[in-house]
Amino acid sequence: MTAPAGAPAVSVSAAIKVDTLTKKYPTTEAIKGISFEVHPGEIFGLIGPDGAGKTTTFQILAGVMEATSGQVAIFGQPAREARTQTGYLTQAFSLYPDLTVAENIRYIGDLRRVPRHEIQERAHRYLSMFDMDRFTDRLAGRLSGGMKQKLALACALVAQPRVLLLDEPTTGVDPVSRREFWDTLAHLALDGLTIMVATPYLDEAERCHRVALMHLGEIREIGTPAELRDHLGAKRLELHTDDLSRAEEILSLESARHAEIYDVQRFGDRLDIIVPDEAIGRKLVESSLVAAGLKADIFRVDRPTLENTFVATLRAIGQDVQSPPYPGRHPHADLKGKTAIGADHLTKRFGGFTAVKDVNVHVKYGEIYGLLGANGAGKTTTIKMLCGLIEATSGDMELAGRKGGFRSDEVRQKIGYMSQKFSLYDDLSISENLDFFAGVYGVPPDEVEEKKRWVLAFSGLEGKENLVTGSLPGGWKQRVAFGASILHEPSVLFLDEPTSGVDPLARRAFWRMINKLADMGTAILVTTHYLEEAEQCNRLGFMVAGELVAEGTPGGVRQQQGGHLLEFVVDQPQKAADLLREKDDRWRVSLFGDRLHVITDASVEQGIRETTDRLNASQIRVLEAREETYSLEDVFIVVVEKARKQGKVAKEE
């Protein structure tokens, strides 16, 4: 095996070696004889749907669980004997909320038998690296999600491990903090730390040197992100049409009948169609839509994303998440076009702190509106005001046809709310939770059993309704919570980070259902930290420090940013990123494995020429350069950083 691009060229044995690893439980085989190696100084990604066996693999590598059979070695030692060389960050952060930042690090350092003077020196080093050295006396429970993540990483690093295992480390962390986190990982890998990470966010997996796709306890593919995308041998057609819902239905049927269409995915203002042959696929798409009386405008052809590859690979082996028909009996199509959620000059103050400042938001029935922002931006406070959970300090609001009395039973029956923090009762069974919410929402008795069967089918939990809810993995909990929030067919739906921690296949099922509800006339306001799925919204609003600073369709907000996004493939990615950040704003340069994204205000030709000259002058070879379309994450970073330059900074940051 060759060393990955951007990883140190170290001629030693594998940092992690897994040989025919198996783990069996009484009722299932979680891992089925997997084998792989991870190079020293490599960032290696493990991706797969819920139940693939990723967490079990991590627990065995960390030495906290025994394998049934097979071999696992960390730098030549059995995993249990190598625990002093291994740092392990679990899905649930193992911080103590009542201890300060410094106390958490000191406690973990003591457990790992690190001398006190070294704990203090290392704590200062890592907290400075993570820009958290000014928060040493703050209680961990009062940190934002991104700051908690950085503290958990500092705790994992205090023993100076040679291998770092990260199991879904950025779930619930905002895009700005996620990008900073991954920049830190890249620097740690360049210093020789070997990192293995599991993530449900495939835009993050693009930042790994190599990736393994795991499914039902088996590894299906291993390679660099580029190799996995190229292996699919397909193109992605981005299409605009007059009726996205109808076009998606038509092309999905064609996909089932023809091998010329691999996949169809709906977004807020376009469809993405994955085809093996561009010319044949384009002709089939255009002819199918024209025959149905729809105009087809294919405005861009590009490479498939890693998520496209992930979905296509799993579908090829018969794995997909089904979307059972929603048993809706009370559509709201007659309301389409009318205002469902309205806010003018909405403001909320807590003492001397203004959490939301002069926000104007209007969402119509049948529309999906995405409210985006970093942690502390004011999104959740805004949602709580809009749905009547807390009183606004000032401003005018409208909800479900009412301009007041949002706490009345009449309004409550019209809205659904899935909170950011899981909103079911962990000590009740799934069935008991659904019965409870059906009663609270006033679901007609003759509809309850049919609706419950739908939630179980949507969640992939048929026959398991008596499981205690608290025993479910996070992704399944989210599906049940989503189902519970729409049992009563609300005309207005608030979803606060509904797919946090949900794998890509399940996320597809979520968004098919969200789009179906919108087609039926439901107004939907959603927040998310996963910017790829924000593409599925019809309109977006970006919040910074309590203010709405940008708004528009996904395509429209891209056009508002100006400048150009340039992509460079180079032979020394981290060195190149650090060099460019010395003179440019740090947010203009981001690293994705062996690729750099550089935002320039110059022309494309001038930007490529000037950047290439700077890199060549430092003996960094540019292998490829081209203009790329802004991703919504790029747009998010640009919007946030421009607002910060204007002095708009969240209080907690």
Image: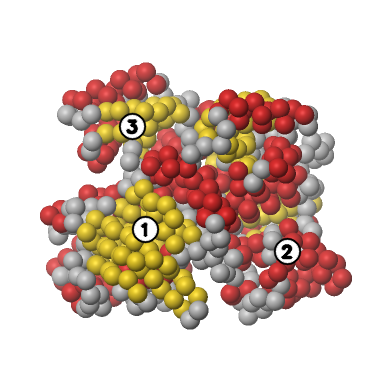
Identify the image quadrant of residue 318. top left
Q: Where is residue 360 in the image (x, y as percent from the top left)?
A: 34, 61
Q: Residues within 10 Å of mark 2 (few under 14, many from 20)?
A: many
Residue designated by label 1: 526
Label 3 sits on a secondary structure element that is strand
Label 2 sits on a secondary structure element that is helix
Q: How crowded is mark 1: few (under 14 residues within 10 Å), some or many (20 or more)?
A: many
Given the image, on which type of amino acid does mark 2 rest?
Leu
Please report contact status of discs 2 and 3: CB closer than 8 Å, yes or no.
no
CA separation in Å, label 3 and label 1: 24 Å
Which residue is most to the front?
646
Q: Where is residue 351 in the image (x, y as percent from the top left)?
A: 48, 81
Given the image, on which type of amino acid does mark 1 rest?
Val
Compared to residue 268, the image places residue 169 above or below, namely below
> Who comes first in sequence, dot 1 or dot 2?
2
In the picture provided, is 545 more to the left or to the right than 266?
Answer: right
Given the image, on which type of amino acid does mark 3 rest?
Leu
Of residues 435 and 172, the one nearer the viewer is 172
Residue designated by label 2: 127
Question: In the drawing, what numbered circle is on residue 239?
Answer: 3
> Who comes first in sequence, dot 3 or dot 1?
3
